[in-house]
Image: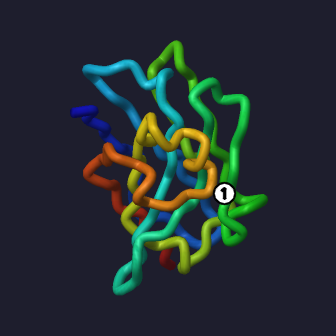
Amino acid sequence: QLQLVESGGGLVQPGGSLRLSCAAPEFRLDYYDIGWFRQPPGKEREGVSWISSSGGSTNYADSVKGRFTISRDNAKNTVYLQMNSLKPEDTAVYYCAACDWNYAYRCRFLRAFHFNSWGQGTQVTVSS
């Protein structure tokens, strides 16, 4: 039932930056842990980053650690993924997802089946 909308994707050169946003126009997001996932072309969906409902805790995949930062502004009902030092291998469709309330204590590990609400995705292409 929870509808999520991603935005901010686009074409960027290697080394560049993008900020993705995840919003829920008709729901409050502050009740939910939120994860970012991505699916590169021809590959399986993989977890990228997680943030707790309060914003007090985060987790990152090793492949993006030190380059990406997840944050949220619950007053604006929005979760962000700041992506810096982008590489061609970051090219993917990026999705945000809300954690199933019953698995909130496990969503930090970024397993897709623990999330039950997904956005439509936003394309990120890193290329010169």
Q: Where is residue 121 in the image (x, y as percent from the top left)?
A: 32, 55
Q: Which colour scheme is used?
A: rainbow
Q: Which residue lies furthest to the right in this view?
A: 66
Crowding near pointer 1: few (<14 within 10 Å), some, many (20+)? some
Q: In this view, does 98 lie to the left or right of 64?
A: left
Question: Does residue 108 appear anywhere in the picture?
Answer: yes
Q: In this view, does 80 lie above or below 50?
A: above
Number of numbered discs overlaid on the protein picture: 1
Residue at x 54% of width, y 78% of height: 88
Q: Which residue lies furthest to the bottom in this view?
A: 42
Residue at x 35% of width, y 44% of height: 6
Residue at x 55% of width, y 48% of height: 107
Question: Does residue 21 appear anywhere in the picture?
Answer: no
Which quarter of the figure has residue 94? bottom left
Q: In this view, does 49 lie above or below 75?
A: below
Q: In this view, does 6 lie to the left or right of 80?
A: left
Question: Given the image, on which type of amino acid does mark 1 rest?
Answer: Asn
Most foreground residue, 118 or 78? 118
- In the rendered image, the quadrant that contains the N terminus is top left
Is disc 1 placed on a helix, strand or loop? loop
Q: Which residue is labeled 1 in the image?
A: 84
Q: Where is residue 58 in the image (x, y as percent from the top left)?
A: 69, 43
Q: Where is residue 89 in the image (x, y as percent from the top left)?
A: 55, 79
Q: Is residue 71 left or right of residue 119?
A: right
Which quarter of the figure has residue 62? bottom right
Q: Position of residue 29 (x, y in %)?
A: 43, 25
Q: Which residue lies furthest to the front in this view?
A: 102
Residue at x 62% of width, y 57% of height: 109
Q: Is residue 23 left or right of residue 13?
A: left
Most foreground residue, 43 or 12? 43
